[in-house]
Image (cartoon, rainbow, N blue to C red):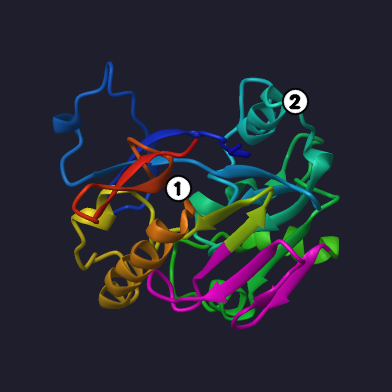
Amino acid sequence: MVQAYSLYEGSFSVDKSRKFVPFDPSIDDPNDRPGSMFIDVHPFLIKTNAGIVLCDTGLGHIDEDGVLKLYNNIRKLGYEPDDVKYVLMSHLHKDHAGGMVSMESGSPRIAFPEAEYIVQRGEWEDAYSGISSSYRTEIFDVVQRSGNLILVEGAGQINAEISYELNGGHTAHHQAFHIQTAGEHYFFGGDVLPEPEEIFHNYVAKYDFDGRRSKELRQSYWSQGAPEGWIFLFYHSKSLTIGRGQQRADGSYKLIAGK
């Protein structure tokens, strides 16, 4: 049984200013936002034997009461923020890292006080280097003071169920995660594999640090993961957010909803 859930934060348009503007396709016209990309944002929750795992944390948007939408979505599944034991960060761009902290108490504090935050050391250092406006260092200051930050390097194992690998591609120190629990193998590729369409319409993306590497990685993950039954988690998907490969009669694989 699949134990992964989208914590959908919303649909957005993004132009060269890198601002994420809410976009409702039922009422908003994309022609009114020229030069914009349109993306959805899906942090993920996974139930494991070692506790609840989050894969990235979204933009950190709040409801009318000042509560993180991420909190609301976690509670809808029957859990509390304190149930989260691991926050797995593919990278630290603001659309992935905004929910690392909460302002609910009136001052910034770590959003998941019982969790270890897993970040690549090189990504952490790049976030403070000033190389990109996509990093919000005021968030990272809170995380660093919390004592919950775990900086990792390269590839390794967090516990018996969770492993990480430095893959680069989208950022120089981007990482992917493999979560193997309850007989399933979940793969979270962050922004190296953000949408299912990129498996079959693979291209070199201008927004990647190394677009050619991302292109090669996507094909590698699919060619290995589809036959092995991996469940793929697509952070920016506008269609299928959780899926796995299914073999066709000719031996090739198509993507179906994870179940």
Q: Secondary structure at mark 2?
A: loop
Q: What's the mark number on residue 78?
A: 2
- Image point (45%, 48%), residue name: 235
The amino acid at mark 1 is Tyr
Q: Is residue 216 left or right of residue 183?
A: left
Q: Which mark is residue 68?
A: none
Residue bearing the label numbered 1: 235
Left or right: 39 as drawn, with respect to 162: left
Marks 2 and 1, how far apart at CA: 22 Å
Span of residues in magenta: 148-177
Residue 209 higher or lower than 44, as above or below: below
Residue lying at the far front of the rendered structure: 249
**Front in this rendered view, residue 183 or 156:** 183
Residue 186 belongs to magenta span: no
Q: In the image, is 141 to the left or to the right of 35?
A: right
On the image, which quarter does residue 125 sit in?
A: bottom right
- Residue 141 is situated, as x and y percent measured from the top left of the image, at 72, 64
Count of marks placed on residues: 2
The amino acid sitting under disc 2 is Gly
Q: Position of residue 104 (x, y in %)?
A: 76, 34
Along the viewing direction, whichever of 218 and 100 lies nearer the viewer: 218
- Helix, strand or loop at label 1? It is loop
